[in-house]
Amino acid sequence: MNVENIQSQMRKGVLEYCILSIIKNGEAYPGDIIEEMKSAGLNLFEGTLYPLLNRLKNAEILSYRWVESTTGPPRKYFSLTEKGLAFYELLESTWKELSGSVEILISKTNKETPNTEL
Amino acid sequence: MNVENIQSQMRKGVLEYCILSIIKNGEAYPGDIIEEMKSAGLNLFEGTLYPLLNRLKNAEILSYRWVESTTGPPRKYFSLTEKGLAFYELLESTWKELSGSVEILISKTNKETPNTEL
DNA sequence: GATAGTACTTTGTATTGCAAGATACCCTGC
DNA sequence: GCAGGGTATCTTGCAATACAAAGTACTATC
């Protein structure tokens, strides 16, 4: 019940959505994705990302191609498939519904009984 | 990788936040909470809620008192402890940070290359 | 051909939402 | 006083998955 755990729990649900959004923007390899996530304030670990990308690839949501690098071994550049784009849009509406529901709930419970404040 | 699973994953992270928000508004028993969540569009199951409430009680975030009911067995009415209020505020800021990060990421990745739209 | 840096993969652990069923309490009718 | 239906709470087992940590592999440089 510590802070890291809470953040991790909340992050969980939106990880796929964020990652697909990055890839939708253009081909990316895992290093790009981790960087972009961090710059938005969302930490992401290799041990999380690689299995996730593989799950998405196996579900035919992502595809990849090998691209050689001058600074090391070749990289897997991922991009969305057609199915992946549809999946992304599903995630998008799911996120909007969820965040909408939360807003409704929070604003409602904050208004009804002001005397809750002691 | 089905729809229910995605929704469930996203819901996961905000469950505690929503439930604490409802309880913060005033004492509530599990039936109340499930009703309120459903009315906001968030399904919640008994098998999820009871263990969660017990975890929060053991962490001294919630306390409860028994209240008799005219329609059945007595109910556990939960309320926030002092520690619970602090925890709620932590969840609140965590949620705001997360949803902020997501918005940043999504809007950024949607703008940079408009030609992604096929 | 050894070393360092980058990239990808795998294994094990802990958490927790959910389904299903069990337990317990209250009331009514007999 | 006890059988049955409705309400409420609790428990058990399963499945999914984020994370940590260690391992493998490729490239370039010395």
Image (tube, coloured by chain):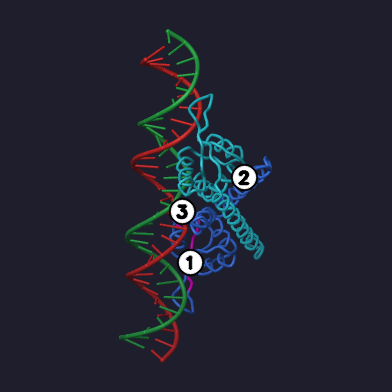
Chain colours: A blue, B cyan, C green, D red
Identify the element where label 3 is drawn: loop
Residue to which mark 2 is pinned: A101
- Residue at 48% x, 37% y is B46
- Viewer-side residue, B74 vs A14: B74
* Three-letter code for the amino acid on which mark 3 is drawn: Ala
Identify the element where label 2 is drawn: helix
Q: Residue furthest front?
A: A118
Relative vertical location of residue D6 with respect to residue D25 in this rendering, above or below: above
Label number found at residue A59:
3
* Three-letter code for the amino acid on which mark 1 is drawn: Arg
Relative vertical location of residue D22 with respect to residue B101 in this rendering, above or below: below
Report x, y in % for residue B117.
Answer: 64, 59
Tag 2: Cα neighbours inside 10 Å, few (<14), some, or many (≥20)?
A: some
Which mark is nearer the camera, 2 or 3?
2
Circles 2 and 3: CB distance less than 8 Å? no
Report x, y in % for residue D20.
Answer: 41, 65
Earlier along the polypeptide chain: callout 1 or callout 3? 3
Which mark is nearer the camera, 2 or 1?
2
Relative vertical location of residue B11 with respect to residue A18 in this rendering, above or below: above
